[in-house]
Image: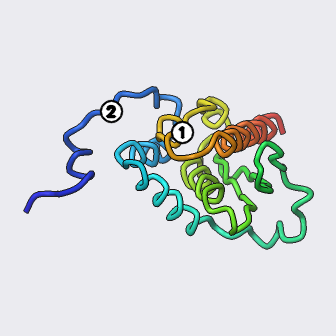
Amino acid sequence: MGKSGWRANRERCLIVNNSTDIPARLAEIVEDFQFAEGREKLEMLLQFSENLPPLPERYAGRLAEMEAVPECMTPVAIAVELIDGGLVYHFAVPEESPTVRGYAAILAEGLRGASPQQVIQLPSDFYLQMGLQNVLTIQRLNGMSGMVAHIKRLAVEKMTA
């Protein structure tokens, strides 16, 4: 029995992009979004938002100590840990902001275990390869760019610590 839908197309197509600076897991997520069309991209973001891990208890009540992302219209706070040479990002994003939560979940999952150097080399506009500019407002895209800038800054801190 043959495969159907975008997965079958995915196996027949080659998407050429500049993903050499994107960690492998994040590159897989980007590729999944490339094969989705229009509304499917939003549905995928919503699925990711449902899978954003809860903030670990050690950060409960300590949001002020986390990295704020003022570029986002939604209040976003980020913490990072260096574990066995790889970074683990934690995000606090209100449930009322599913697209921002979805993007945070993509970053958390896609960058889990990446080295600080890999995060620093991440193209700041990698999300454009996902086609999100076709389904999100410029304000949301600016917020996403801000989140990438802050995760990179946190990676630099971990490198120099």
Q: Can you identify the residue that label 2 sits on?
A: 15
Residue positioned 52% across, 35% down in the render: 128
For this orientation, the residue located farthest to the left is: 1
Residue positioned 64% across, 54% down in the render: 104
Residue 47: give its label.
none
Q: Within the image, what quadrant is residue 117 found in?
A: top right
Q: Can you identify the residue that label 1 sits on?
A: 133
The label nearer to you, 2 versus 1, is 1
Query: What is the three-letter code of the residue carrying label 2?
Result: Ile
Label count reads 2
Badge 2 element: loop
Q: Quadrant of the N terminus?
A: bottom left
Q: Is residue 4 rendered to the left or right of residue 149? A: left
Q: Is residue 143 above or below residue 53?
A: above
Could you say where residue 143 lies in the image, as x and y percent from the top left? Answer: 71, 44
Could you say where residue 126 lies in the image, as x and y percent from the top left? Answer: 55, 35
- Indicate which disc, 2 or 1, sits on the residue closer to the N terminus: 2
Query: What is the three-letter code of the residue carrying label 1?
Result: Gln
Q: Residues within 10 Å of mark 2 (few under 14, many from 20)?
A: few
- Residue nearest the observer in this picture, 9 or 27: 9
Residue positioned 62% across, 44% down in the render: 137
Q: Quadrant of the C terminus?
A: top right
Q: CA distance from mark 2 to mark 1?
A: 18 Å
Q: Is residue 32 rendered to the left or right of residue 126? A: left
- Residue nearest the observer in this picture, 17 or 133: 133
